[in-house]
Amino acid sequence: MKKWLIGIVVVIILSIPVLFVAWGMTWKWTSFAPGNTDAWIGFWGGYLGAIIGALAAGAIAYFVARRQINLQAEMDNKREKQFLVTQLRIEKYQEAYSLLSELNREFAVSSGLVIKYVHKDIALEELRSKEDQCQKNILALTRKIKSLEPFVQDLKELHDNIQTRYWLMGNIIYDGYTYPNNPKKFIEDTSFDRFKKVSDELTDYTVDICGKINSYLKNEIDRLEGES
């Protein structure tokens, strides 16, 4: 209900007793009550003043209470939104950490396949088949991680660095082992030790990124506990 309409209703309600008192003083059947007109006016004035004062106090208390309730509701809504936002960030950080861990396992698998091939534990066809599947897994994980970049602190830059390092390792695997165009030139340009160094640096770097994301996650959990 609008405030101006409430005001009109209150004025009407308060006016009715005043009119009845004024009319009552002129009625013959009320003339048996003792006292003159001035006394009765004073009585009814005090009586109505008490009623009006009580109504005014009640109205003030109502509006003050309503205002406090609205403020509290606004604070609760704001706190709930902050809680939900923080909770969402935690879920994204957890997902990013999980995907990066899976990605690093695929890097290790890819590197391990090349090592097995070099040591002649697996044939070239097996290397190609398993390495191709490994690359598909890495590509799928990379896409999922990329979708989380807007939600996780520094993830875009860190993920770009991972992909740059992986691109270097992938080129070495493809050109030197799985589909070599010029094996002799590859041996001259890139030794197995070089491959090991690149692959180890990639996995170590990804482990460090996982640790960094985990520290971000811990900060978000601490913030959530502080807000609750």
Image (cartoon, rainbow, N blue to C red):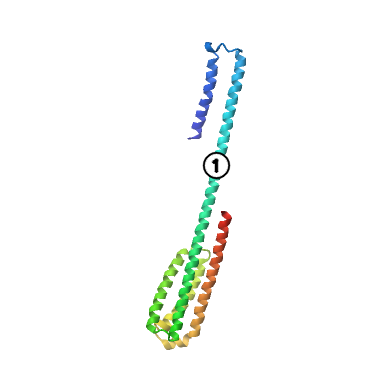
Q: Which of 70 and 156 is in front in this view?
A: 70
Q: Residue 91 location, x and y as percent?
A: 49, 61
Q: How crowded is mark 1: few (under 14 residues within 10 Å), some or many (20 or more)?
A: few
Name the residue that disc number 1 marks.
69
In the rendered image, the vertical position of residue 132 relative to residue 221, given as above or below: below
* Placement of 217 over or under 50, stated as above or below: below
What residue sits 42% from the left and 71% below the top? 139
Residue 92 position within the rendered picture, expressed as x and y whole percent measured from the top left = 49, 62
The residue located at (55%, 18%) in the rendering is 21
| Mark 1: secondary structure | helix
Q: Can residue 195 be seen in this view?
A: yes
- For image coordinates 52% across by 22% down, the residue present is 16
- Residue 159 position (above or below residue 33): below
Q: Hey, what amino acid is under mark 1? A: Ile
Within the image, what quadrant is residue 33 found in?
top right
Question: Residue 113's spot in the image, x, y percent?
Answer: 44, 80
